[in-house]
Image (cartoon, grey):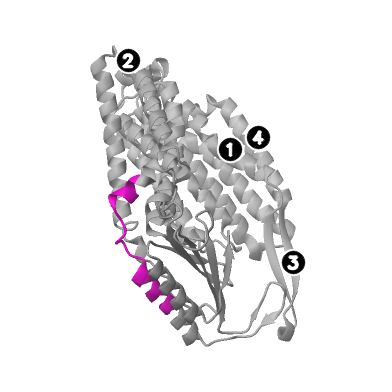
Amino acid sequence: MVQTYLKKIELASRAECRNRKKIRLILLILTIVGALFEIKDYKVMTITENAYNDGIRFQRSPSLEGIFGAFLMFLAACFGLFAVHGVFSDLTSKQNADIQLSLPMNAKERYLSKLMAVFKLHILPILTAGIAVILIGSAKEDAFDMMGYIVRFQLVTLAVALFVDSVSIFCMSCCGAKAEGIYTSIIMGGCISVLPIMFFMEAIIGFSGVDNTYSFYMNPFYVFGGSILTALEEVGTGIGATMPYILANLLMSFATLFAAYFIYRRRDGRHVGKPIVYSLFLELFMFTGLTTLFFVFVYTGGWSIGLTAALIICIVIRIILARAKITPIKFVIWIGKYATALAIFIVLMGAAYYTGGFGYYKVRYHMNNEKAINIEATAISANPSSAYTSSETKNRYFQRDFRTENTTAANDVTVPANCTREEAKQAVEDINDLIDRYHNLQDRDNESFLSIFTDNYSNWYYSHDYDYYNIRITISDLKFNTKYTANITLDDETEYEEFCSELSKILEESYTESYR
């Protein structure tokens, strides 16, 4: 019985693949050529270093010297949209729907057979090409010990391909027309990839003044959709730091495919031809797209133009999707839904603003096993009542390295230790106490919040128009180049001078001044 069930699914998927010869050929060309170029471009360089007391040592560094092969592989990953559109054409074509529904297969069997067809057409070529690149590239360079770098590259490619397939299948299951199935997939995929990052940058980092996400593995918002490409920027050769995020991305794609089944099984021939089958999906699609646009316009400025452009886009899409007669009442309803999305966005931004990025402003840097850190600060004051003119800013720079062990600088010069671990930790904690005292939410008011939308500033703490005091503190791990940054904005000159005075004492360094 089980063999008969699986055989039925296999035969149906094989038939789907035979009907998609063109897209199969395109994907094979892209993956084969892309894999060949990646193998050619994969290099592992051996760098000789003088380790002084330790003698000569060698450091191996892998890299892809060209981007053409990677471009073709990611292009193949994105081509999953067309593979899905062809395999799931019964959702948008009356003729294919009649044929599919006449087969002795239930909805579950049809869905599984189509998933298997998509796997054969799209995922299997990318997976096979990736394995070939890993094995042949490593053998060519005699660098199986460096395999983590190229494995990570191929896993990210696979994650992008699965993301494209899962979003496309989900959107196709909610649409009954070809055009809507394609453009909703593209827009939703873009929004899922961009919106979490925009939310994090604007609503959390922007309103907290704290950024602790210099490295990829410190920012979980990069796990969504196409943002997983950022994993390729992670410093190092292995996949240990990024692997949890790649796996989470893959799991979300599988969860989307699972959820799409429950939508697919409700489809029948009566839904074919209807642009958007489910009104809930339409509202989710519009809200996600509008929210992404709102964040983009806050980030780039031009809020008034952005609101108008978003409203026009919203109305045009709803006109295209409308099949019944368009009446003035419908226009009023559409504008009301737009206003609701805008109101939700403003409430969300207000909540983030008045809570300091939902409490993220309290995040502090704490030393663990770092051997060398750098603490630097830039203090900027602009006060029309001061001796210098309102068109000038007075800048102060503070900087000190804390080295608990002898370290080797970039120019191969050994830098001796200058403090104990306890002294370095104490300096960091003193900095944290200083930030705690001055970096609070007491200066948050409605006027400053509204200036985010009216003054075209991407960061609220720069909206003081030549009458502000800003201190930017950065703590860096000199070995791994990770950073923690805190921006403190003060309105009172006395507090600003007190802050600078205490900062100078903690760092035990004289500061420099300049005018700009």
- On the image, the x and y values in percent for residue 196 come to 41, 47
- In the picture as drawn, the residue positioned furthest to the left comes out as 329
- Please name the residue that numbered disc 3 is placed on: 46
> Is 471 located above or below residue 370 in the figure?
above
Q: Which residues are magenta?
A: 428-450
Q: Quadrant of the N terminus?
A: top left
Residue 492: mark in rendering: none
Total number of numbered discs in the rendering: 4
Q: Is residue 419 magenta?
A: no
Could you tell me if residue 400 is visible in this image?
yes
Query: Which structural element holds mark 4?
Result: helix
- On the image, the x and y values in percent for residue 115 come to 43, 36
Residue 323: mark in rendering: 2
- On the image, the x and y values in percent for residue 116 come to 46, 37
Q: Nearer the viewer, residue 274 or 383?
A: 383
- Residue type, label 4: Ile
Query: Which structural element holds mark 1?
Result: helix
Q: Main secondary structure of the magenta part?
A: helix
- Residue type, label 3: Thr
Q: Is residue 440 magenta?
A: yes
Could you tell me if residue 3 is visible in this image?
no
Answer few, some or many: residues within 10 Å of disc 2's Cα (few below 14, many 20 plus, some between 14 and 19).
few
- Residue type, label 2: Arg
Residue 29: mark in rendering: 4
- Please name the residue that numbered disc 1 is placed on: 76
Residue, x 32% and y 53% (percent of image)? 353
Q: Nearer the viewer, residue 358 or 301?
A: 301
